[in-house]
Amino acid sequence: MNLYQHFRKEEHAFIDQVLEWKDVVDIQYRPKLTDFLDPREQEIVKQVIGHNGDVLVDFLGGNPTAERKRALLFPQYYQPTDDDFMLTYLEIHYPVKFVSIDHRKVLGTLMSLGLKRGKFGDILTNEELMQFIAANEIADYLMLNLQSIGKATVSLRKISKEDLIEEIEEWTEQVTTVSSLRLDVVLAAIYNLSRQKVQTIIQNGLVKVNWKITDQSSFECREDDVLSVRGFGRSRIHMIEGKTKRDKWRIKIGRQI
C-alpha cells in the first residue's frame, strides 16, 4: 500500500522526516525526541508509526489540553517518563497594572529572538497570568535574553508542571451547505463573509489550514481540517456529509468560541 496516498502532497516531506526518525530508533535502538509538533503533525506521526510495530510513539506538551507537543519515538523495551520529553515550564512576570501583553506579542517576541517555532509549545493565558512551555535546550537562553515583550519589562520564572494553567476550549457546531470545497467558499460560508473579501484575506497570508499558512483560494478542504482566520477565529470541518439534491456539499462545522 502506498503510504503517501492518504496525505496531501505538501505533507509528503514531513512523512519522509518521520520515516527517518523511525529508522534512527530501529537502527540505533534508542529513543528519538522531536521538536514541538502541531496537532496535524502529531496525527501524521501516529499514522506513520502505527501501533503494532517495533517502534512506538508517545506525546507530551505539558498539561492534558496541550495543543503543541513533543513526540518521543522509542523501541518496545523502553519505558518513557516525563523527563524524556525535556520540557521547561515558564511563567512571565511583568507589571500587570501598567501594561498588557497577549499571546501574539509573546509569540512575536520569542520568534524575534531567533528561535524556531518548534522549540516552544503552547502559550497559556488566564486573565493576567502568562505561561509557556519550552524545550529544555533553549531554557537558559530564554532566561538570559527574554527581558521585554512589547513595552513591558518582563522576567521569567521556572514553574512545575502542576502549576500550568489549563485552558478549556469551547466550540459551537453548525451545519451549512457550500457549492464547492474550495477554501474561499468554505470560509465565506463559515464566517458569513463575501467570497471576494475571503480571497483578499487568504492572499494576505492571514489564513492557516492545519496550522500552516495557505495562500491559495482554490485549496480543497477535507474532513478534519482545522481552519484559522486571523481576526475571525478558528473552525474545524467535523464532517463532509455528502451532496444535497441541489448538488451542494453539506458540511458539519465546529467553531471555536
Image: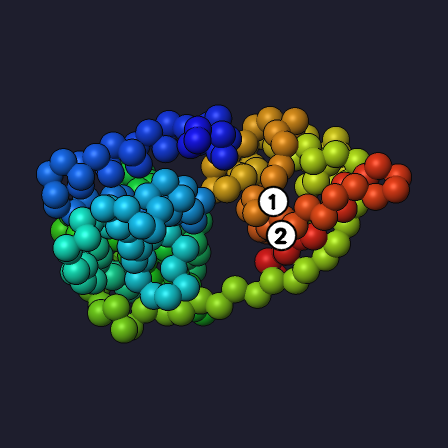
Q: Mark 1 or 2 closer to N-term? A: 1
Q: Residue at x 79, y 41 (%)?
A: 243
Q: From the viewer's perspective, is 209 left or right of 242? A: left
Of helix, strand and loop, which one carries label 1?
Answer: loop
- Tell me if I can see residue 119 in this picture: no
- Marker disc for residue 202: none
Q: Which residue is mark 2?
A: 238
Q: Taking 130 as reference, is 236 above or below it?
A: above
* Residue 80 in which image quadrant: bottom left
Spot the residue most to the right.
246
Q: Determine the CA span between mark 1 and mark 2.
A: 6 Å
Mark 1: amino acid: Glu
Q: Position of residue 212 (x, y in %)?
A: 47, 37
Residue 95 picture quarter? bottom left
Rendered view: 226 above or below 183: below
Residue type at numbered disc 2: His
Dot 2 surroundings within 10 Å: few (below 14), some, or many (20 or more)?
some
Asked whether 69 or 204 is in front, the reply is 69
Quarter of the image where the N terminus is located: top left
Q: Residues within 10 Å of mark 1 (few under 14, many from 20)?
A: some
Instruction: Tell me the residue that label 1 is attached to.
Output: 223
- The percent coordinates of residue 20 (x first, y second) are 25, 32
Residue at x-position 66% and y-position 62%: 172
55, 215: nearer the viewer: 55
- The kind of secondary structure element at disc 2 is strand
Residue 214's image quarter? Answer: top right
Marks 2 and 1: in contact by CB < 8 Å?
yes
At which x and y percent is residue 127?
45, 69
